[in-house]
Amino acid sequence: MQDIRDLLEGLRRTPKILSEFVRTIPEEKLDLRRGGGFWTVAEHISHLAQVQPMLLDRFERFMNEDHPEFVPYIPGETKEEPDTPHRMSMASALDQFAGYRDNQLLLLESANDITWKKTRHTRNMRHTPSTY
């Protein structure tokens, strides 16, 4: 049970830690690309914000389905998806991340012992936007 409390506390603290981290980075460094195939800091933060709806959906499915099955999500793997995330303003990205994290915590805090002991199944197939 302590592991669950520690996990929830870590999830609760993450938005503040992330916001404080981003504030330490000079604005001109947020879009600095270290080389081909590397994401910028701004793209990483945008990605974290953009995947939160998918994670909330997965948490909901995990709690509500007997044997939830998930397709692994790999950014940029399909032709329809760009190799880099859409760059959001840092304020919007951090707000979105924090808002979805709050919703995830509300959901996870309502989980009972049976839910916490469930396991998931992962399909070994490529991600398509409609299957996450």
Image (spheres, helix red, strand yellow):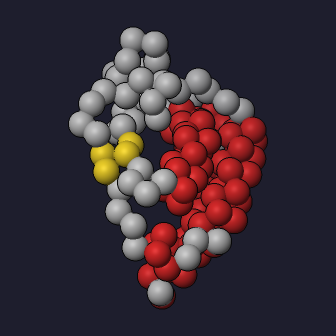
User: Would residue 2 be found to the left or right of residue 50 on screen?
Assistant: left
Residue at 68% x, 50% y is 100
**Residue farthest left in this picture:** 124
User: Would residue 66 be found to the left or right of residue 100 on screen?
Assistant: left
Inspect this view and state whether residue 45 appears: no
Count numbered badges in the picture.
Answer: 0
Observer-nearest of 62 and 54: 62
Above or below, comparing residue 21 to residue 28 in the picture: below
User: Would residue 83 be found to the left or right of residue 60 on screen?
Assistant: left
Residue at 73% x, 51% y is 99
Above or below, comparing residue 132 to residue 58 in the picture: above
**Residue 55: percent from the left, percent from the top?**
54, 47
Observer-nearest of 53 and 19: 53
**Residue farthest front in this picture:** 66
Observer-nearest of 70 and 67: 67
Inspect this view and state whether residue 68 appears: yes
**Residue 26: percent from the left, percent from the top?**
64, 42
Above or below, comparing residue 62 to residue 72 in the picture: below
**Residue 35: percent from the left, percent from the top?**
35, 26
**Residue 63: percent from the left, percent from the top?**
53, 60
**Residue farthest top in this picture:** 79
Residue at 48% x, 54% y is 65
Above or below, comparing residue 77 to residue 30 in the picture: above
**Residue farthest bottom in this picture:** 2
In which image quadrant can residue 20 be found? Answer: bottom right
